[in-house]
Image (spheres, grey):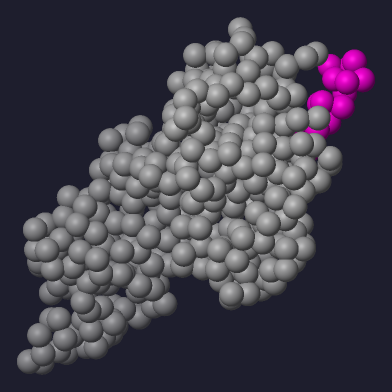
Amino acid sequence: MKIAIIGGGPAGLMAAETASGAGAKVDLYDAMPSVGRKFLLAGKGGLNLTHSEPLDVLLSRYGLRRAQLSPIIRSFGPDAIREWAAGLGIKTFVGTSRRVFPADLKAAPLLRAWLRRLRQRGVAFHVRHRWRGWSDDRLRFETPSGEHLVGADAVILALGGASWPTLGSDGAWVPLLRELGVPIVQLRPANCGFDVYWSTHLKTKFAGHPVKSVAVQVVTPGGGVHRQRGEFVLTETGVEGGVIYGVSSVLRDRIEKEGEATLMVDLAPDRDQGRLMRDLSKPRGKRTMATHLERQAGIAGVKSALLREVCPKDAFADPVRLAQAIKAVPLTLVAPRPLEEAISTAGGVKFEELDDRLMIRRFPGVFCAGEMLDWEAPTGGYLLTACLATGYAAGAGAVTWILKRRAGSVSTIRTTR
């Protein structure tokens, strides 16, 4: 049985792993000169493979798509991912945040070992092959030597989202599938930064400065409050960074609905408001307000600048108002950063269009995996976990479908309307 996989990211590679392990002849195609480019970039600061928190908690990170992803991740979840990495000779460890990393924190050794094993299993890699849809039931590829037409018993699409297009995830597959009538949720930025109308002084003096040890708070669609601790970076255009990414979906959706979103920032999460008020009420004598803030509240540098950016001048003379301001600095976010700057993508092929093997119902023999599906999750190992799990599911699903077709229990592959 011959399976064609389009896309050489984690989902496509895992689909190749699963299908080739089941005895399929696998050809993997990618538009870039090499595979795994975004995977390597993700591991530049330390590859976060998955997360070790309880599985029910982990599954909750997938929000509205928890129901669809739960059985898939339960079949190939964090423990299976660690076992898989160990099989490649890559030891892993659990960090203080319960995130799981390779022992050396690097992506390149894992990718090299992975590609070596795939080649040993007979997987053929075809780079610089840009998918252009179908010609009848054959795949069309644009290559440096011209157009190539390829036949296969089953096809797995693992083409990624549309973030970081220079690495291959450019969303060019969207119009190809839409022309065939496949419903697709609009691709939007996820795990992204946001624009804020900073004063010239703030963006000139403090752009690029990290704002550490803070907590952010947003109101969720259901009226609840989501609070998260971490840090972010103040940029010329606004804010970005880990704690921002953790609430980015709520902020993005609020901006789309209302035109802006308010992010409350607690600049002193380890001090309650009462303590701050008492400390700030102490006489400052001849000390400047900047010195007083630093000594009594630990507010200095970029934190002090943020406070002055949004807090009325007269509030600095009132310890009660100043303490309230420190615990809840309101930042008005006006737009998410462009999709090509985002870490990941929301939107994609609707799960409702797929069966439980991730096959497109209207096109038997065509499967989807990875970030091109309609789901999103925060950073922290959740993105890679779902990409690997859906790749595993699609690879296994394609093999099962081919075997059932040969047994005469399913219809043949069909890619025309």
Classify residue 342 as left or right of residue 112: left
Instruction: Give the image location of residue 314, x and y in percent.
Output: 10, 67
Residue 34, compared with residue 109, is above or below; it is above
- Give the x, y percent position of residue 414: 69, 13
Q: Nearer the viewer, residue 130 or 168?
A: 130
Q: Is residue 233 above or below residue 69?
A: below
Viewer-side residue, 119 vs 260: 119
Residue nearest the observer in this picture, 203 or 305: 203
Residue shown at 75%/52% (left/top)? 120
Toward which corner of the image does residue 415 lie, by quadrant? top right
Residue 319, given in percent of the width and then of the height, sits at 21, 75
Q: Is residue 383 left or right of residue 274?
A: right
Magenta highlight on residue 123:
no
Viewport quadrant of the N terminus: top right
Vertically, is 82 above or below 156?
below
From the viewer's perspective, tell me whether residue 20 is left or right of residue 158: right
- For the question of whether residue 126 can be seen, the reply is yes
Q: How many marks?
A: 0
Q: Residue at 72% across / 68% down in the picture?
A: 89
The residue located at (26%, 86%) in the rendering is: 296
Magenta-tinted stretch = 396-410
